[in-house]
């Protein structure tokens, strides 16, 4: 089944993107992943439990004269501003997160990360995705509210709230399913065929209905893996955040004890510490989020070849690159490529002297882009092009110099041979003449 086979292929494709570690690429992808998955797609659970013993406890007397009038107007205004500011920040984060969905998919698709370029190219699609998520969230709240009002008259009691929580579980699962499929399958379709959200769903829906078994297995595997990985990542993030936060806490306390300007310095140190902890979380989460998105793209391409965004990455994962096999493959060394980029048959021809000119023409016709992968970059990001597989890089001028050097050596040997023949003839003439 494709959904099972793609688990291993997703590991290979993720490793091809992230290894060797390039600081620039990792930081940029971590920034994108920090926004992806948040915003309107987030949700919380409904607390349930036995709360009647709390209601049976006697409530202390409360003076009815103390009310909202005792709260200063300045405090109410400040709370209102904080609520409005928090709501606006949440909306801004949701908009950026919707745009980053397409930036993330395009980065995985092209094996290069260009945040500003991909943001400009996908601004409209991101806004449409944000609008779809906002409408879906409003529908979720509206349906739940209408159901509660229709079932319960007046103010609901504890048992009514518990029943409403049970009713909300399947409703929220349906909402989460739609949001997941929209982010991981419909968004790639929108990017590939330049569609809107509803048009992307219409394009993707026949693929789901004709391959419902693969997508059901995909959902089960993803939920199981995410449940396990969230536990592991929680421990890793907690340890990493603690290790990063301790120095900032110490410096902040020392700066605060100094007083005066040290208080403001402590605030700055605290903000830097918070940003560092967030960076640790994003860096730990980035490879996992990359793996799951690649897994979704592989399943999408296997169930519908017309919607395949990563055919080259899929080929490398399954067939290997330059003879290096993909997952579960064993490659015979006699069938592979040596470090110079020649096959064994070509190397034997070169050693025997046959086909030397053909090999030089073949090598000289190979462009640097063919010898180096476009996504391979230096340690700091996607600027300097380097390849993991090519060790030697001979340009046409190098081969010209080598050819010229070989011709020069042959002419030198011929001159030396002529000189030796002339010297031997002179010796024979002297011998014939005698003394």
Image (cartoon, rainbow, N blue to C red):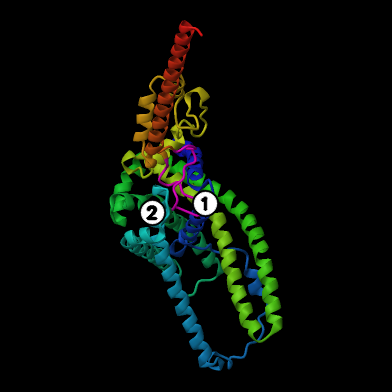
Callout 2: 10 Å neighbours few (<14), some, many (20+)? Answer: many
Residue at the (62%, 68%) spot, across then down? 51
Residue shown at 52%/67% (left/top)? 161
The residue pinned by badge 1 equals 379
> Which quadrant of the structure image shows residue 64?
bottom right
Please give left or right for residue 258 compared with residue 97 in the image. Answer: right
Give the secondary structure at mark 1.
loop
Label 2, on which residue?
182
In this view, 111 is above or below 101: above
Relative depth, front residue between 323 and 244? 323
Q: Nearer the viewer, residue 246 or 21?
A: 21
Nearer to the camera, 205 or 355: 355
Q: x, y percentage for residue 286?
A: 52, 54
Q: Which residues are magenta?
A: 372-393
Residue 117 sits above or below residue 332 on the image: below
- Residue 115, given in percent of the width and then of the height, sits at 41, 59
- 226 in the magenta segment: no
Q: Quadrant of residue 241?
A: bottom right
Residue 238 visible in rendering? yes
- Front residue of this view, candidates 129 and 383: 383
Q: Residue furthest front?
A: 435
Give the position of the N terminus as an image quadrant. top left
Circle 2 sits in a helix, a strand or a loop, which is it? helix
């Amino acid at each position: 089944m494709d959904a099972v086979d793609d688990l291993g292929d997703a590991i290979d494709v993720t490793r091809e993107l992230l290894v060797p570690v390039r600081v620039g690429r990792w930081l940029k992808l971590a920034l994108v992943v920090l926004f992806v998955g948040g915003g309107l797609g987030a949700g919380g659970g409904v607390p349930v439990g036995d709360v009647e013993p709390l209601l049976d406890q006697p409530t202390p007397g409360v003076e009815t004269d103390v009310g909202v009038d005792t709260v200063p107007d300045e405090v109410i205004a400040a709370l209102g501003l904080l609520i409005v500011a928090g709501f606006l920040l949440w909306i801004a984060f949701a908009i950026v997160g919707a745009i980053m969905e397409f930036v993330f998919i395009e980065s995985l698709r092209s094996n290069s990360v260009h945040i500003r370029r991909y943001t400009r190219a996908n601004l409209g699609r991101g806004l449409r995705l944000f609008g779809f998520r906002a409408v879906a969230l409003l529908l979720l709240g509206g349906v739940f509210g209408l159901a509660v009002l229709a079932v319960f008259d007046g103010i609901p009691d504890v048992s009514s709230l518990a029943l409403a929580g049970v009713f909300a579980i399947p409703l929220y699962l349906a909402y989460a399913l739609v949001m997941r499929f929209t982010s991981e399958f419909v968004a790639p379709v929108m990017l590939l065929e330049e569609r809107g959200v509803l048009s992307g769903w219409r394009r993707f829906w026949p693929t789901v209905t004709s391959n419902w078994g693969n997508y059901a297995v995909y959902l089960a595997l993803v939920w199981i893996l995410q449940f396990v990985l969230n536990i592991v990542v929680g421990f890793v993030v907690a340890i990493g955040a603690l290790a990063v936060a301790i120095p900032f806490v110490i410096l902040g306390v020392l700066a605060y004890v100094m007083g005066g300007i040290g208080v403001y310095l402590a605030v700055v140190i605290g903000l830097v510490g918070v940003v560092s902890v967030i960076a640790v979380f994003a860096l730990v989460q980035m490879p996992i989020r990359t793996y799951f998105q690649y897994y979704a793209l592989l399943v999408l391409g296997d169930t519908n070849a017309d919607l395949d965004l990563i055919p080259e990455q899929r080929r490398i994962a399954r067939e290997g690159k330059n003879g290096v096999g993909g997952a579960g493959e064993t490659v015979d060394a006699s069938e592979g490529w040596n470090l110079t980029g020649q096959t064994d048959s070509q190397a034997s021809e070169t050693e025997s002297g046959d086909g030397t000119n053909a090999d030089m023409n073949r090598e000289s016709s190979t462009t640097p882009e063919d010898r180096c992968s476009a996504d391979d970059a230096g340690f700091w990001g996607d600027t300097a092009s380097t390849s993991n597989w090519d060790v030697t890089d001979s340009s046409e001028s190098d081969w010209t110099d080598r050819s010229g050097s070989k011709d020069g050596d042959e002419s030198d040997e011929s001159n030396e041979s002529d000189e030796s023949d002339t010297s031997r003839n002179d010796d024979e003439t002297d011998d014939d003449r005698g003394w």
